[in-house]
Amino acid sequence: MDLSLIQKDILITLVTLYQRQSHSVKGEEIADLIQRNPGTVRNQMQALKTIGLVDGVPGPKGGYIPTGLAYTALNLDLAEDGDYDVAISRNGVVVNGANVQAVAFTTLCHPDICHAEIKLVGSAKLFEIGDQITVGPTPVNKLLIRGEVFGKDESKQSLLIATSEIISLPKKPISTYMSSPLKSLTCSNTLHDALVLFNREHIHGAPILDNGKLAGIITMSDIAKSIEKDLPLTTKVTEVMTNDVVEAPAETRLLDVISRFKEREIGRLIVVDKGIPVGIITQSDIIRVFTAL
């Protein structure tokens, strides 16, 4: 099916926004993203409706949605599992009107240059020469690409970038990187016992188990605060431990744990297998992973 350049622009932007929002998209929103007159977009939408690529949704919350034929016309597969959710950021801000469909490296062997072509689902007009962009992480290989736009092809909806950084985040589960067997304390242990364990094992925190089940966690910071309060070292660890312990299943991917560390502002979490604590992973463990890449 032969579509004009503006029709492709409008249709790709519609598909991108619909995949991201899961509801109808207003013509004004598309016009704003592709920098076109809203009247022009409305006129083109009528033409796209006539040939069966777009459906209109009436009402104040209505707009347009792409049909299955639209995906065929754009050589896209209907995605039921989020094929179009690879984000692209411009100057540190995620671009809502575009996702990445494919990345092709055009130079790899040159010692000083590594260029890539970024194929978009969305409009290349959203980007300018000199923009600093970040692509990813991709869903399978967790690939993260950073670079600067030095060219673009609006007919193909693609960007040419000079890459500055390419990172492949580890895909293995956290059980690969955790410290095991678990160094732990029991509810009957004291602060003195905790200090002895920390010194012997060269660690800064340990979970507290009650009959094999996780009861809490204690860190050097907790002990330091207890000493400031003049609590004796004979104090039970249960009196100063943190009860809200962050856990993660052993099969959790490392990237998800990194996000959790950032969200919860923590330095360690307990790895569990079928609810049983089996290991611990810390920020130091993660740093060792990346320094070994």
Image: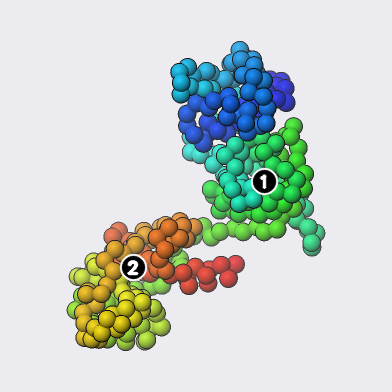
- Amino acid beneath label 2: Val
- Amino acid beneath label 1: Val
Query: Relative to the observer, which residue lies in front, 254 or 40?
Result: 40
Q: Position of residue 144 (x, y in %)?
A: 60, 54
**Quarter occupied by the C terminus:** bottom right
Q: Which residue is mark 1?
A: 103
Quadrant of the rendered image containing residue 262: bottom left
Q: Is residue 165 left or right of residue 289?
A: right
Q: Residues within 10 Å of mark 2 (few under 14, many from 20)?
A: some
Task: Tell me if label 1 and label 2 are in contact, CB under 8 Å.
Answer: no
**Quarter occupied by the N terminus:** top right
Residue at (57% x, 29% y) in the render: 29
Q: Is residue 58 left or right of residue 290?
A: left
Q: Which residue is mark 2?
A: 278
Is disc 1 placed on a helix, strand or loop? strand
Q: Residues within 10 Å of mark 1 (few under 14, many from 20)?
A: some
Is disc 2 placed on a helix, strand or loop? strand
Distance CA(mark 1)–CA(mark 2): 39 Å
Residue at (38% x, 73% y) in the render: 180
Question: In the rendered structure, which disc, 1 or 2, sits on the residue that comes first in sequence?
Answer: 1
